[in-house]
Image: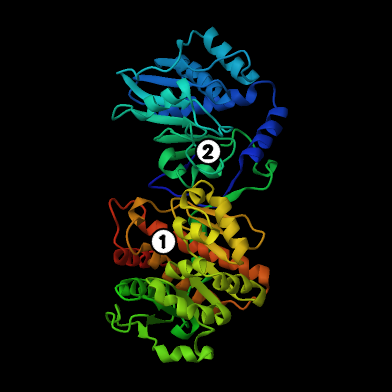
Amino acid sequence: MQLLLSDAQLPGHDHPLLGVATSRQLEQRLQASLPDHALIERAGLALAKLALALAPQGRMIWLLCGPGNNGGDALIAARHLQEAGRRVQVRHIGASASAPPDARHALARALAAGVPIQPGPAEIPADCELVVDGLLGLGTDRPAAGALAEAIQHINARPAGVRALAVDLPSGLHAGTGACLGDAVRADHTLCLLSLKPGLFTAEGRSRCGTIWFDALGALPDAAGPPEALLSGLAALSTWQQRHARSPSSHKGRQGDVLVLGGASGMSGAVGLAGAAALAAGAGRVYLSPLDAQGTGLPRPELMLWRAERWDDVSAWQDLTLVCGCGGGSAVTQRLPALLRAARRLVLDADALNAVAAAPALRELLALRRARGQATLLTPHPLEAARLLDCDAAAIQHARLDAARRLALRFGATVVLKGSGSVIASPAPLPPRINASGGAALATAGTGDVLAGWLGGLWAQQAAQCHDSAAGSAEQALLELACAGVAWHGLAAQGWRGPLRAADLIERMARLHR
């Protein structure tokens, strides 16, 4: 068993995330290689060991068990906990003769061992130390109802100081998407069993799972089918830093140039934040092209001003790394046709995305870029993604992996769908990534501008140092760069309590250079 993800720890390498169907196949293959009921016995023992570690005070452990194998895991854990001398109480909801064989086995063994089991939900006992959520598992695809819904409500209304441990995933959370199917348990800890599921790490998963633990129960990684996605952690950042470490002979001309277009009237701060982030990321030279000529001055003396008349000379800017849209307002629309046609590397953020979404001609220009060998990186938040896909933000949040893939394929671009568990997808046949870093501290004005600028700064360096022209290699390199930038952005906010101001975020990111 390993601690996979907590506020203080991020995964050190990528982990495959399996969808519901692939997880089921893995479970069936492993069960076929073991004696009857051996797999559920392993799961229950693993759960009992973690429960003992999380409840050291010796007070009661209260287990809520549903009718399926998720409840069976909790029943086996209750038996082991009682054998270890702990006081347990089980509430079994929905038990029936049609339960899976493993679940019936777990119930029979718990009853034979004298585990106190009562039907239905109830109030959490006053002397309870830990609640175990074994109500619903991997196959949940609709809201809980009746006694199961009531039990979820009891868990979420637990007294302060009583922690909740979810088995495999919090009840009511969709394993594949991270969407809440009605009400869902808010767990302090989740023990994910056999395989890691995408829904634990994006959408509502991050806020519902708490600290995530993982036990493969003896399953071999190569026994599973292709992953739905990869969980991307510190490896993305460290790999990028190792590959692009500066030699003693480096100079600014070898670090690439960035041009940031944005900052319409009243929004000059956005373009300044993006430019400052590109500079801090390590770009050799960074130019700002504010759309409001009367805006405030350059936010840092190292930044340079790109005057409006220079846009007339396409050869002056088409080979730079362009970041477009930060605080661009409606004024950015005028510049977009030329950028979409000519820029070799283009980061589109914020109002540039809104302008593309509103204009079919701009959508077509964006979709043509990949065929011309031009690379694009889109950084939408859910509402911007919804505009691009002609749906609403709720639909995006209910299927974040699918939304990121659709955007990447529709527009031939690498996509960073921002939010809790940001999703990074490529138009190439590569599995999408879910970023493991970050948190609520990033929910402040300007942090998206910082990310767009930082990605532009990394991309400029990569382009200056890498001459691999193969399309597949270039798209994989861009996907990896995006993963590194998003991980970097989130890691700088890790452990921060309260809102983190965007300008301070840049300085925290800069301190992570090595």
Q: Position of residue 43 (x, y in %)?
A: 56, 27
Tell me how the rendering is colored. Answer: rainbow
Toward the viewer: 266 or 105? Answer: 266
Camera-near label (2 vs 1) is 2
Toward the viewer: 292 or 486? Answer: 292
In the image, residue 207 sits, relative to residue 168, either above or below, namely below
- Give the crowd class for mark 1: few <14, some 14-19, many >=20 residues within 10 Å: many
- Residue type beneath disc 2: His
User: Circle 1 is placed at which residue position?
Assistant: 489
**In the figure, residue 29 lies in which quadrant?**
top right
Q: Position of residue 438 (x, y in %)?
A: 40, 53
User: Circle 2 is placed at which residue position?
Assistant: 174
Q: Are marks 2 and 1 in contact (CB under 8 Å)?
A: no
- Residue type beneath disc 1: His
> In the rendered view of the protein, which quadrant contains the C terminus?
bottom left
Toward the viewer: 435 or 271? Answer: 271
Taking the image as shown, residue 10 lies to the left or right of residue 161, namely: right
